[in-house]
Amino acid sequence: MFFDFAVFPAVASLAAASAAPGAAPASAADFPWLSASILFPIAAALLIPFVPDKGDGKQVRWFALGVSLITFLLTVGGYLNGYDPSVEGLQLVERWQWLPNLGLAWSVGADGLSMPLILLTSFITSLAALAAWPVSFKPRLFYFLLLAMDGGQIAVFAVQDMLLFFLAWELELLPVYLLLAIWGAKKRQYAATKFILYTAGGSVFILLAALAMAFYGGGTPSFEFTALMAKEFPLKFQLLAYAGLLIAFGVKLPIVPLHTWLPDAHGEATAPVHMLLAGILLKMGGYALLRFNVQLLPEAHAQFAPLLVVLGVVNIIYAALTSFAQRNLKRKIAYSSISHMGFVLIGIGSFSALGTSGAMLQMVSHGLIGASLFFLVGATYDRTHTLQLDEMGGVGQKMRKMFALWTICSLASLALPGMSGFVSELMVFVGFATSEAYALSFRIVMAVLAAVGVILTPIYLLSMLREIFFGKENAELASHTHLVDAEPREIYVISCLLVPIIGIGLYPRLVTDSYRASIEALVQRELTALDRPLGNPPGGLIRRSPLGELLPPALLQAPALTAAVA
Amino acid sequence: MPSAAELAWLIPVLPLAGACLVGLGLISFNRTINRLRKPVALLLITCVGAAAALSYGVLAEQLAGAGPTEVLFNWASAGSFNLQMGFRVDALGAVMLSLVTTIAVLVMVYSDGYMAHDKGYVRFFTYLALFSSSMLGLVISPNLLEIYVFWELVGMCSYLLVGFWYDRDGAANAAQKAFVVNRVGDFGLLLGILGLFWATGSFGFEEIGARLTEAVAAGSVSNGAAVLLCLLVFMGPMAKSAQFPLHVWLPDAMEGPTPISALIHAATMVAAGVFLVARLQPVYVPFPEVQTVIAVVGTITLVLGASIALTQQDLKKGLAYSTVSQLGYMMLAMGCGAPVAGMFHLVTHAFFKAMLFLGSGSVIHAMEEVVGHEPVLAQDMRLMGGLRRYMPVTATTFFIGCVAISGIPPLAGFWSKDEILGVAFGQFPLLWVAGFATAGLTAFYMFRLYFLTFEGSFRGTDKAVQAQLLAAAGKGSGSAEHGDEHGHAHAEHPHESGWQMAAPLVVLAVPSVLIGLLGTPWNSRFAALLDPREAAEAAEHFSWGEFLPLAGASVGISLLGIGVAVLAYALHKLDLATAVAGRFPAVNAFLANKWYLDAINEKLFVQGSRKLARQVLEVDSKVVDGVVNLTGLVTLGSGEGLKYFETGRAQFYALIVFGGVIALVVLFGVLG
């Protein structure tokens, strides 16, 4: 393992050199942080065959953990050195012509939409590497895929070119497919095939839309987001492209009824893969919706947004009910993921800075909470060797720490105040309820239905806890299995996830301030596109009054504390 | 030196810090921390004690006439929108702070005795500190949003504590029920908060009140909508304060350890709903419809609670329904537009009900020596009787509690309940009748509890009754044998509890007797603190001619209730079983089945939601997924193709996709 660490500096410089040929980094700000964090894990993954390992994975896993941690540090370095949260536009931009006559360029950059998700990706992947500790079947291949996925997913969030985006989107399918198909449970082939058919089927639309948008209006085709943003697409064209992209990203997010790959894929995956699927993969859908549908096609978004809200509500209720009826633990949590992504949809469709900000925060928050729950599912399965709730019961007596961790994570998932899920859902609720883009009756109906989710979520999560941990110990289970309590590694993984979950819950501006400017610019774009006159704003005229009146007077009396906190 | 009000944020933070420290210790060094029982308890009691001291400081400042203090900071923001958090100290808050911390400290001292032999001793104290912190945070919240935050957190603590003995199925179900029913209330609360924010652009109590009235007057919000929003917000207090029909969780919550029943489910958390309604008075007052609904809900609840309490055989359940009933009184006061009266009853009730619950815990603790650790046996009054001889301190304090709650002057309950009834008499005469009659029922059921538990002869060793009770609870002879195994350890008769348990009882007995004198109608210091103008007005308009007939009537009906209880359960002159239950079996069944509300709840909501969920899952797997699989089949052309994919060579497919993509790229590259 010491040997492995010694390799790193060399690899890092190699990756940096390959990313920036001929351009020696002059200062920290000029260092190609994003390219490095994309290419470094991939390059390092290629070195895995040379890692001395007896085949039991005991060396490789240290290597993979080290690489993923360095990638995490690279993304953090980029955030600290080259990213200014108060700037709304692209930062950390790197651009090299690749195929000039095709308009294809290696163009990466980050704004408020991508930066939090890039950090989330490298963070969750590091924890997944730690979560994958017990993997002993074909460890080299496993970690290779894990690291390749790391780079691929950062690329999805960082690239600023639609063709490149499409390539990255497709490229990360392969590792997921293989991770599912080789390390999955019994029905893994079916699940993996379903996953790839769904996603590949959806991504055809991305390609079509990308080509259409790039070639629209003649001239040299350009796939770069900035170039596409500058184009004025007619409404009909926008609607078509929007619909296509919605299908593609709706599969990923997922949006009911395009979701059925997810319970199968999640149900069959092993815990670390699971963490990546729930923690990062689903966020690609939400990110892409914001990036393409909202940013590039704002007029179409103005037309489609009510549909997004309705679909979001359907997601919340439908998936919560299915989750309640599920008897398989993994599938239960998988459906709960779908339910939580409903809030992302509502937030995206809310036409308010607060709601959209909430959608973004919900993605980050669910990335953390979903990953923690799936990790716990895996850890529990390692002990009980069953995922059927009927075969569990009373497990809490032998596994007290596990019980505590489960309880904390479930409470986080059911949006308990003080944890991140509450803040994001609240922001979506408040943002949507006060949005002026919708008629009052629509807002009321949707808010009430979405709030039904507030009742349903604790029902299925607490029932689950009750069936696993409470009550008399299941004698049959106890006799067959050795129920050891959580080990330090597991507690460490969960703690790492809980720190940001609780941190965001206590002071959400930790995260929201990092993307605030970009989201506000995005919503401004939405609102200008919202051609139709706002009509008579329903009721509550006070809301439109100047800021001074809006704030409670006490705030003005207490500037000292505000300043101190700010 | 900063004033106590400026340091008020420390009041919830201190217990929280203690709880976090111990909680982290429990997760990282479980065994070591679990062994440090007394030091941990001492640390956490010190934390809550310090919070109590600070609260008294705040209260003293308020008594000296300090104005409200409010400190806010920007918690979340997007666009022009800002969410504020912070804290606020005023007279109402100061009273609640002192009340909560006092009872919390006493309950913690008591728990040291009650939980002495429990494996989860340290965990219990951690939860207690966590609860105190959330409750205190709720009290100092400056706006509705922050109230909602702590509202949920106290709900979580209640969940953790009700389910504390997680190996018991009853506890598991009760904990979940408590959380879910409260979430139903929170559903309304959340929507109401959202709606009020939409209508007024604020989360602050006064601003909402002022702007909502303005908006209604200006016509931008219709009166109906405003009323609806107010009622939605009221759903939260309905659930938390166990108002009909969302009271169903509270009696079940008695599955938790008894100190919890005293602290959370009698004295503090359940009062949070009443407290919130008091805070929301500026919002509610302009809408008489809302006030009427609150008053009616309160009245239904007080009748319901008292009537069910008549037939309970479980000591704790009897007290639980009594709590439901008393919360109804408080709500009635709120609905009559007399928040001071409601808050006064909240305070007096907190003291004597905490004492009664702790007393019942002392009884249960003593009974466990005789019948073993089986709640079905240890809490059933059919096995008690004659305990006064064995545990005089408990019996005396319990008796004081019974007199206090029955409304006999000069004990606490008389002054507060009479004030509520006096207000109701002026506002809603019909509701006053219900409240007045229930006062009689209250006296009757409380003394029934007292006589069955403490007087007569001890029945705890009656094996036949024990077996019968176990059978009725569906716990076969297995448990009985289990009990017999430890039979040698069981005492013949119960003993008085140790000083940790007896001392809080005695301490609580003092305010139970005396605190009512702070709220005499002719010179109410309590009202003077909360609402000086109203207090002065009330003192001015006070006349013995109005006060005496009403007060005399309530004392009269209470004495009647006590008299019936004495005849039936102390002197055995009156056989109620044949006289009433036998003659009106329908009524008896109705009450014994708790108005059939649990059954309806189970049938309609629990089974209904399960069935709905199963159907949706069915649709999901058969229809939605079915279409997908069918499409897959059709696209592939034949079962052959599917087999091909199922054999795991689908990588090939991915390759085709990539090939296609690259071909397209090249094609466009050539064309472009």
Image: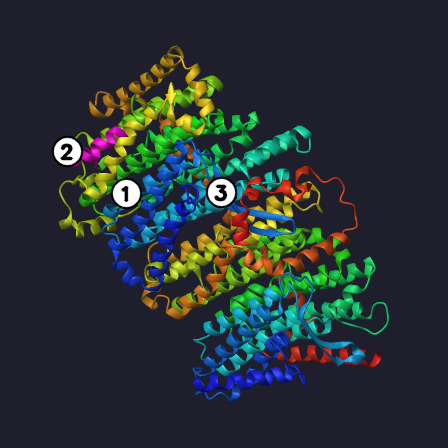
Residue B563 is a magenta residue:
no
A365 or B15, nearer to the observer: B15
Disc 1: host chain:
B
Provide the residue designation for mark 3: B147
Dot 1 and dot 3 within a common chain:
yes
Q: CA distance from mark 3 to mark 2?
A: 46 Å
Q: Secondary structure at mark 3?
A: helix
| Quadrant of the rendering where the N terminus of chain B is positioned | top left
The label nearer to you, 2 versus 1, is 2
Colour setting:
rainbow
Disc 2: host chain:
B
Mark 2 in CB contact with mark 1 (< 8 angstroms): no
Q: Position of residue B35 (x, y in %)?
A: 25, 59
Q: Position of residue A257 (x, y in %)?
A: 64, 58
The label nearer to you, 3 versus 2, is 3
Viewer can see residue B261: no
Residue at image x 58%, y 83%? A43
Q: Residues within 10 Å of mark 2 (few under 14, many from 20)?
A: some
The label nearer to you, 1 versus 3, is 3
Provide the residue designation for mark 2: B389
Q: Residues within 10 Å of mark 1 (few under 14, many from 20)?
A: some
Provide the residue designation for mark 1: B376
Residue B390 is a magenta residue:
yes
Write down the region rendered in magenta.
B384-401
Q: Secondary structure at mark 1?
A: helix
Earlier residue among tags 2 and 1: 1
Q: Amino acid at mark 2?
A: Arg
Answer above or below: position of A264 versus A452. Answer: below
Q: Is residue B292 left or right of residue B46?
A: right
Q: Amino acid at mark 1?
A: Val
Answer above or below: position of A369 versus B78. Answer: below
